Image (cartoon, rainbow, N blue to C red):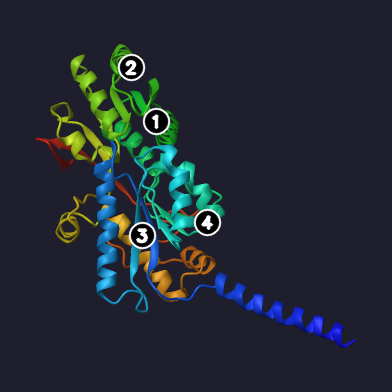
Amino acid sequence: MNKLWWTVGAVVVIGLAWWGYSATQTIPAETGPIKIGLISPMTGEAATFGDAWAGGAELAVKEINAAGGIDGRQLELVTEDDRCVAQTGPSIFSKLIDIDKVVAIVGPLCSTSAGAGLPIAEEGRIPTIIGASAPSLTHDRAFVFRNYPSDSSQAIYAAHYLNETLGKKSVAVVYVNNDWGIELNRVFVDEFKKLGGEILVDEGTPQDVTDMRTVIAKVRGSVPDAVYLALYPQGGVVALKAIRQVDLNVPLIGTDLFSTGEIFDVADAEGVLFTIPNTNARDEFVGRVKSETGREGNEVSGFAYDAVRILAAAFAEVGTEAEAVRAYLEDLNFTDSVALPSVTFDAEGDLESDASWTMRVVKDGAPVDVQ
């Protein structure tokens, strides 16, 4: 009997000891830096946008840390370059979550890598605020939110501008054949048709396209009133060059991805229109990004800046536990935004009051608001 009780006692002691060890391994102390993943195209054809996205996030972290951090803990950005291609998405999300142990993620900015990687963030229950604008990316994902306006509103604005402001009744569309381009094209085409317009050409091209002479010959042959270019900067430059070569003199409208040096620096872009979200984060704020981080800011910088500060507000209020942060974001009413009047999310994690859009034109190698 004594032997039996000794055995039972030993098992209990060992069990309690193991429980104590296990508890210390699974419940980390709330000390040290708070790691946030940042996903941005730091190289590749969207690198200008990636630099601006990173600059906004870095400025927010710098300011928060200078003010004492979150309850004395510093924020730490772990930056990953997705190159704006789908192949990088899964590996980058897995690294940030499994190896770097981030508690939240800002980005991606590109819909291509977001579409491939966001299922990993959702499965890992990592609160994520994206800039990627393909409409479906937030759908049916409890931990994914977007504080940048989706392409649904951008495409609708472009369709109405062409049809109502410019009075154009027929359009040729050339789009990049990836998650971003396909969804943007779908919304634009549906909306333009609803307005009574006609789509004469609806042509997808590879993301790495280097020659569009055949596509643009088809566009020119259709005799459109205007051309809508839902393309990345590299594809945009290729398309503009081909359009100028065939002397197609109709209005050309690009998207927010045309707000980049790759477009402004080519002579073929002169006079090209492009859509851009209305934002308060313009000249003064962009100058702060440049002076404080060394990066070239643009319109997207304010949205990345806000995303970091929204997460910081969540950490300060409810801590870093994923479910608590998710619940905080669901009920968010962020009135301290630099990009928008305020940020609240709808049931799908999208902006509840979507940002409005405006039209700009390339003039003398620089973007100018259309008056």
Rendered residue at 27%/34% (across/down): 233
Labelled disc at residue 192:
1
In the rendering, at what x and y percent does residue 304 appear? 32, 56
Rendered residue at 36%/60% (across/down): 307
Upstream in the sequence, badge 1 or badge 4?
1
In the rendering, at what x and y percent does residue 343 appear? 38, 61
**Dot 1, crowdedness within 10 Å: few (<14), some or many (≥20)?**
many
* Marks 4,2: beta carbons within 8 A: no
Among all residues in the image, which is located at the extreme front? 3
Q: On the image, numbered disc 4 is attached to which residue?
A: 347
Q: Looking at the image, is mark 1 or mark 4 nearer the viewer?
A: 4
Cα distance between the residues tagged 2 and 3: 39 Å
Res. 358 in view: no
Upstream in the sequence, badge 4 or badge 2?
2
Labelled disc at residue 215:
2
* Marks 1,4: beta carbons within 8 A: no
Is 51 left or right of 13, judged from the image as shown?
A: left
Nearest to the observer: residue 339 or residue 42: 42
Q: Looking at the image, is mark 1 or mark 2 nearer the viewer?
A: 2
Label 4 amino acid? Ala
